[in-house]
């Protein structure tokens, strides 16, 4: 039966096997695509993020599913949950390190005795670069595959942490800790999101929620762990430990296999392509101008930019604010862990609920943003450890809901074929939001 929720005011609901797709027709896998492709293009392969009818082929290891081929993909299998496991662990490493910079922030203040704004730029640059690399990560994934991109990111991040341990001043940390590790984490993060969406259809919200729980678990675990390492072996040697964690992403990235096709014959006929044609398409895929002409996509990108401005503040400044109020450093670091715990709980619960027929994912996303904005607004006026911990709890719940639903709602909005390039643009918008926040704080 058709649903008349706000999600369906423009786009018609479609079902597949009795299962709704969030109220969006373009998220439906339809075997009959003759009306969408010009005559004679039915046999031309299409890949994630490319325009309809683009004559591009790739090797089995590198191909991404298109709308036309999605009906031939084997999804929601038991083996596909290995991709979720790899994504979970990469989120654990990447977000666990990024969002515990507040612990490093205090150590860097004491080490270099620079201003708070100058010191905060180290973490802000890292966050910004991890997002700004999105369009390049999208194009590279389409060109060489998710596994190669994630492995490259792991090496970048490990080298960045290793060199950062030798940094004599903040200027060097801007380049090594900020730029190098940020670029590496961005290259690791993008494949961990899109690969999960490639492998799931009916349980895409649950799979995404579980995968992104790694962020909450990482934030919860890494904050006290990093504090312990800094107190025990100093912040410089702690960076070597983080370099080792980043290198473990190489093994995890090997699980980012492309989804299997039901027809082996179709798979074998789409393997050869000219190198120059692939290279040309790589540069075209950096920025999809056609996506920027759509009002709903532009509105989405603006919302992502604004949201990031409020997202970075608590993770960076909560420990410092708590210490300034007389809270012990260990307890201040645990506030970041509280955000991580609430974050994790929200991702699992909302991931399960978002797959129900009655769930309106857009409304859930919008409400989480509004509640999160209220929490960030009242945070500076809170006094006392218990009150701050309560605000952090609600903030973590809203952020967990938002981050868990973001890729799924985006897929509902643009469809699986354009998820890659659109998510790349989303990462770029979030990175620009991080830079705007840092610039505002500096002045």
Image (cartoon, grey):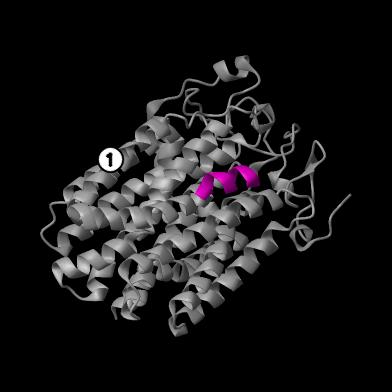
Residue 81 % position (x, y): 57, 33
Residue pictured at 38% horizontal, 27% vertical:
275
Q: As displayed, is residue 125 above or below residue 50? A: below
Would residue 409 be counted in the magenta stretch?
A: no
Task: Kindly identify the residue that appears in the image at 48 percent across and 63 percent down.
Answer: 339
Q: Position of residue 190 (x, y in %)?
A: 45, 45
Residue 224 at x, y percent in the picture: 36, 57
Residue ID at (53%, 31%): 82
Q: Which residue is mark 1?
A: 244
**Residue 330's image quarter?**
bottom left
Is residue 140 found left or right of 80 in the rendered image? left
Asked which secondary structure carries label 1, the reply is helix
Q: Which residues are magenta?
A: 205-213
Nearer to the camera, 215 or 300: 215
Is 404 located above or below residue 102 in the figure? Answer: above
Q: Residue furthest left?
A: 168
Image quadrant containing the C terminus: bottom left
Relative to 256, 436 lies left or right: left
Task: From the viewer's perspective, tell me whether residue 250 is left or right of residue 352.
Answer: left
Whether residue 365 is visible to the viewer of this picture, yes or no, is: yes
Q: Residues within 10 Å of mark 1 (few under 14, many from 20)?
A: some
Q: Can you give x and y, in whole percent of width and height, for residue 369 in the image?
A: 58, 68
């Amino acid at each position: 039966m058709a649903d008349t929720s706000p999600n369906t005011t423009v786009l018609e609901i479609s079902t597949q096997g009795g299962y709704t797709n969030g109220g969006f027709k373009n998220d439906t896998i339809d075997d009959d695509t003759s009306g969408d492709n010009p005559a004679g293009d039915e046999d031309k392969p299409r890949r994630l993020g490319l325009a309809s009818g683009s004559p591009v082929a790739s090797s089995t290891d590198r191909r991404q599913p298109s709308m036309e081929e999605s009906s031939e993909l084997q999804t929601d299998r038991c083996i596909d949950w290995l991709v979720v496991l790899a994504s979970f662990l990469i989120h654990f490493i990447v977000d666990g390190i990024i969002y515990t910079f507040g612990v490093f922030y205090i150590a860097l203040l004491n080490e270099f005795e620079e201003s708070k704004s100058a010191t905060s730029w180290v973490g802000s640059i890292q966050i910004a670069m991890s997002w700004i690399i999105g369009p390049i990560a999208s194009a590279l994934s389409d060109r060489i595959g998710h596994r190669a991109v994630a492995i490259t990111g792991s090496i970048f991040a490990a080298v960045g942490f290793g060199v950062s341990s030798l940094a004599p001043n903040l200027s060097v940390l801007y380049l090594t800790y900020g730029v190098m590790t940020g670029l590496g984490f961005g290259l690791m993060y993008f494949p961990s999101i899109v690969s999960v969406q490639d492998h799931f259809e009916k349980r895409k919200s649950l799979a995404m929620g579980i995968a992104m729980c790694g962020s909450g678990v990482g934030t919860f675990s890494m904050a006290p762990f990093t504090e312990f390492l800094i107190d025990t072996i100093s912040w410089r040697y702690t960076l070597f430990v983080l370099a080792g964690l980043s290198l473990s992403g190489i093994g995890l990235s090997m699980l980012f296999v492309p989804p299997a096709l039901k027809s082996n014959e179709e798979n074998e006929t789409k393997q050869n392509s000219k190198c120059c044609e692939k290279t040309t398409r790589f540069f075209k895929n950096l920025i999809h101008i056609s996506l920027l002409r759509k009002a709903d996509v532009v509105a989405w990108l603006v919302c992502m930019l604004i949201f990031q401005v409020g997202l970075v503040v608590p993770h960076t400044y909560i420990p410092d604010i708590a210490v300034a109020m007389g809270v012990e450093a260990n307890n201040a670091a645990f506030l970041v862990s509280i955000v991580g715990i609430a974050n994790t709980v929200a991702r699992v619960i909302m991931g399960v609920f978002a797959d129900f027929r009655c769930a309106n994912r857009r409304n859930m996303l919008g409400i989480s943003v509004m509640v999160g904005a209220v929490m960030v607004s009242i945070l500076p006026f809170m006094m006392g450890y218990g009150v701050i911990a309560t605000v952090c709890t609600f903030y973590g719940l809203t952020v967990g809901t938002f981050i868990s639903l973001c890729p799924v709602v985006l897929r509902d909005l643009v469809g699986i074929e354009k998820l890659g390039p659109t998510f790349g643009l989303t990462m770029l918008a979030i990175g620009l939001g991080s830079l705007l926040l840092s610039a505002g704080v500096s002045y």
